[in-house]
Amino acid sequence: MKKLWTVQSEYTLNKIIEDGIYYPNFNKSLEFTQRRKNSYKYILNEFNQRNKTEYNGLIFCISEFENKAIKNYEEYKNMVYMSGAGGISNSKDDYYLLELEVDDNIDLCSCQFYNFCDLIVFLDDTEDYTITEQDIENVKSNLFIEDSCTNLVQSHLGYIDKNMIRNVYRSYHGRLKMHMIYEPPVFEIYGPPKLDEQYGECSKIEYYKTHLINKNNK
């Protein structure tokens, strides 16, 4: 079994509770259609080709950091803190972190996170850069990880099944901020928000834990 970590919205969690499974669809995603259509489609096609599937979207996950699998929540938080990478988490109140376990027989189409960021730039943000076909081919050739993993690894799924979920956490967000050129980097950490229990938010995480986690899978 492989351990994966993914940040998802309340909408996604509710769909899993209702249907037992959630299938993403890039064609219905505003971000996909407006900002990242080419790069998302490229990695989706690669995933479908490898797994002989016909999914319409992907679940983006983080699986490894500094050549090691992320095995628990503390290691996940350390990854967010140490990597300083934007876009791997979300501090909004209606987003949650899912701890997943998936079968080894799924080709996760794993890639180096920062190389995927380059792919987005080269395929979708071309108005701001001078990009050549050779630049694009270079990024594609270095995108996927075949053997040992490097630094921050992004993995993918075609769906989330309820039986994959091992735990649910409040989303955890970290950011590296440079204040001045002569000062050392300062990390700003955004952990679970302090919310008044009278609004029920503190019980909401327990609601998702109760309805999403199969006790036999823990």
Image (cartoon, rainbow, N blue to C red):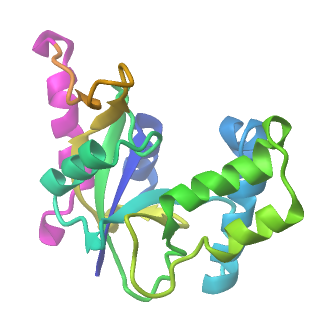
Q: Is residue 23 above or below residue 17?
A: below
14 sits left or right of 66 in the view: right
Where is residue 15 shown, x and y percent of the image?
Answer: 46, 46
Say above or below: 121 vs 61: above
Q: Is residue 43 visible?
A: yes
Q: Magenta residues, as a range?
A: 196-218
Which percent across, then down, holds residue 181?
Answer: 39, 25
Asked if residue 38 is positioned above or below residue 103 in the image, the reply reads above
**Residue 31 shown left or right of residue 218 in the figure:** right
Q: Position of residue 104 (x, y in %)?
A: 37, 86
- Name the image quarter holding residue 134: bottom right
Q: Main secondary structure of the magenta part?
A: helix
Taking depth in this image into account, of 60 and 75 the one nearest to the observer is 75
- Coordinates of residue 208 in the picture (x, y in percent): 25, 42
Q: Residue at x 44, y 88 (%)?
A: 147
Outermost residue to the front = 182
Q: Quadrant of residue 71?
A: bottom left
- Residue at point 78%, 53% (across, down): 123
Image point 30% across, 66% down: which residue?
66
Q: Residue at x 28, y 81 (%)?
A: 1
Res 21 seen here: no
Q: How many marks?
A: 0
Q: Quadrant of residue 63?
A: bottom left
**Quadrant of the rendering where the C terminus is positioned:** bottom left
Is residue 82 in the magenta section? no
Residue 53 is left or right of residue 105, and the answer is right
Q: Is residue 217 above or below residue 62?
A: below
- Pick whichever, 198 or 124, lies toward us: 124
Q: Is residue 203 magenta?
A: yes
